[in-house]
């Protein structure tokens, strides 16, 4: 297997993507309570597409009526003029737009052939290609993570790390089960920045700084709390200036200016939406701050190890990945230190927020943007396998990790564990076996 990963690493990753896309398409016909492929926060991310691309306005009334579960519309804040708000970022909708428009072209074509197809942007004919777009962006993030690992490690270790970070964590869940959430797009955006940073460091050209700025702006555009990862190239530049001649300072200042300006330009659609919504809505309806932060008492241990969606407890692979950053330190101290620093900063900020559990969440979904950087540590760990026996251990560990994650996702999706709130130790461990027994019993009964 190691030889195959050496020869065709990307082909194996592509094959996994095709399988997962087929799995997603196979699940489309299954009955759904609200009759929509979008759900939870995803309905709000998706709502931008029909209202902007088809209705050419920011009035979400029709979209919410079609996308939200029955009765949920009355809980949405409304301005005196009768307009509904949307506190969610527009970045996912911008990334999804080509796939949504492909669905619209298909709908128009079927309508021209006499089929009774609604052109409202709400039906499955729009949502299926859009959600496949989300899955595709997530996979592009996997390829970028693989490329980032290749900067330091061989093909087998890099491909294995990328595949495990994808299939052994909640990344795969938010690509296949709930692709309407922002996490697949966020994973892609951070993976893009990481790849470009490693490609252009330690002294990016002006074009490199512009590319990095575009990636940084995209991260904020998709999911604002993940924007701290945009600090990677800026902090790296400060470290580099310590060892560069004074003449290099001017180049870095120009580069950082281009970086900041480009990031602001890419983020500007969100600013435009905020301004438009403020003009439409009464003061105080938008934006919603979303809760309080407790800066002096962050729940750092809980956000990592709690039964209530703890990042490491639900996906133990990530604990080893974080530890692997110490091995990465031997390859590149700056990359290891900065990756670890931003991860710790993200832990602190999110751990300080009252909603650190993420509500309905498969694992620590708020920290998914950290996985691209942590995968570097995972690759460093796998790279230590220098014999057939060691690689056999890697395969065995990988099989256990994938089985754990698949069973966990089944527990979560099928209602064997609560989606919001803490699970029990029994559900975390033997509950997976109990679920299998229950499913087999139900299958035999039918």
Image (cartoon, helix red, strand yellow):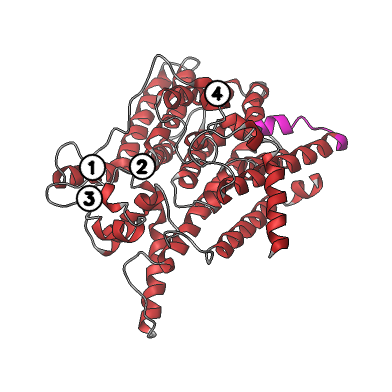
Where is 245 relative to 67, above or below?
above
Q: Are marks 2 and 1 in contact (CB under 8 Å)?
A: no
The span from disc 3 to disc 4 (Cα, nearest Å) is 40 Å
Q: Do the residues labelled 4 and 2 touch (CB within 8 Å)?
A: no
Using the numbered discs, state the Cα–Cα distance from disc 4 to disc 2 in whole angstroms. 23 Å
Residue 143 pos. (x, y %): 59, 47
Q: Which of marks 3 and 4 is nearer the N terminus?
A: 3
User: Which residue is the site of mark 1?
Assistant: 274
Q: Does the magenta stretch include residue 383?
A: yes
Q: Which mark is in front, 3 or 2?
A: 3
Q: Residue 221 carries which label?
A: 2
Residue segment shown in magenta: 377-389
Give the distance between the C-alpha atoms of the residues marked 3 and 2, in whole angstroms.
21 Å
Tell me the quarter of the picture where residue 408 sits: top right
Local secondary structure at mark 1: helix
User: Which residue is painted at 50% across and 21% down in the image?
Assistant: 300
Residue furthest out toward the front: 445
Disc 3 and disc 1 in contact, CB within 8 angstroms? no
Q: Earlier in the sequence, mark 2 or mark 1?
A: 2
Q: Which of marks 3 and 4 is in front?
A: 3
The residue carrying mark 4 is 340
Q: Dominant secondary structure of the magenta stretch? A: helix
């Amino acid at each position: 297997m190691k030889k195959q990963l050496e020869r065709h690493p990307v082909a194996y990753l592509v094959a996994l993507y095709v399988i997962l896309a087929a799995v997603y398409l196979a699940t489309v016909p299954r009955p759904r309570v609200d009759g929509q492929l979008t759900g939870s926060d995803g309905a709000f991310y998706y709502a931008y597409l029909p209202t902007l691309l088809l209705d050419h306005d920011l009035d979400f009334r029709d979209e919410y009526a079609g996308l939200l579960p029955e009765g949920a519309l009355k809980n949405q804040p409304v301005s005196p003029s009768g307009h509904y708000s949307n506190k969610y970022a527009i970045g996912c909708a911008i990334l999804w737009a080509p796939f949504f428009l492909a669905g619209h072209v298909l709908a128009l074509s079927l309508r021209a052939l006499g089929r009774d197809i609604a052109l409202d942007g709400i039906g499955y004919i729009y949502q299926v290609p859009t959600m496949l777009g989300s899955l595709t962006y997530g996979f592009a993030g996997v390829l970028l993570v693989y490329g980032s690992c290749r900067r330091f490690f061989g093909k087998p270790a890099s491909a294995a790390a990328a595949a495990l970070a994808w299939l052994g964590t909640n990344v795969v869940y938010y690509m296949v089960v709930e692709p309407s959430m922002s996490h697949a797009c966020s994973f892609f955006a951070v993976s893009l920045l990481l790849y470009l940073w490693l490609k252009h460091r330690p002294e990016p050209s002006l074009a490199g700084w512009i590319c990095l700025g575009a990636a940084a702006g995209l991260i904020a555009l998709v999911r604002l709390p993940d924007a701290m990862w945009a600090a990677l190239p800026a902090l790296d530049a400060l470290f580099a200036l310590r060892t560069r001649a004074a003449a290099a300072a001017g180049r870095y200042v120009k580069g950082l200016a281009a970086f900041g300006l480009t990031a602001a330009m890419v983020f500007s659609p969100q600013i435009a939406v905020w301004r438009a919504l403020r003009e439409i809505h009464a003061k105080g309806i938008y934006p919603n701050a979303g809760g309080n932060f407790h800066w002096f008492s962050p729940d750092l241990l809980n956000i990592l190890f709690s039964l209530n969606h703890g990042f490491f407890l639900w996906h133990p692979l990530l604990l080893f990945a974080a530890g692997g950053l110490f091995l990465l330190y031997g390859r590149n101290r700056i990359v290891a230190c900065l990756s670890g620093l931003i991860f710790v900063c993200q832990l602190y900020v999110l751990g300080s927020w009252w909603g650190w559990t993420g509500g309905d969440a498969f694992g620590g979904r708020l920290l998914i943007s950290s996985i691209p950087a942590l995968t570097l540590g995972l690759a460093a760990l796998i790279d230590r396998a220098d014999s057939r026996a060691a690689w056999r251990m890697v395969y065995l560990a990988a099989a256990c990790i994938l089985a754990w994650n698949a069973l966990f996702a089944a527990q979560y999706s099928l209602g064997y564990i609560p989606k919001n709130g803490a699970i029990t130790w029994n559900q975390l461990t033997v509950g997976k076996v109990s679920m299998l027994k229950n499913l087999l019993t139900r299958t035999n009964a039918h």
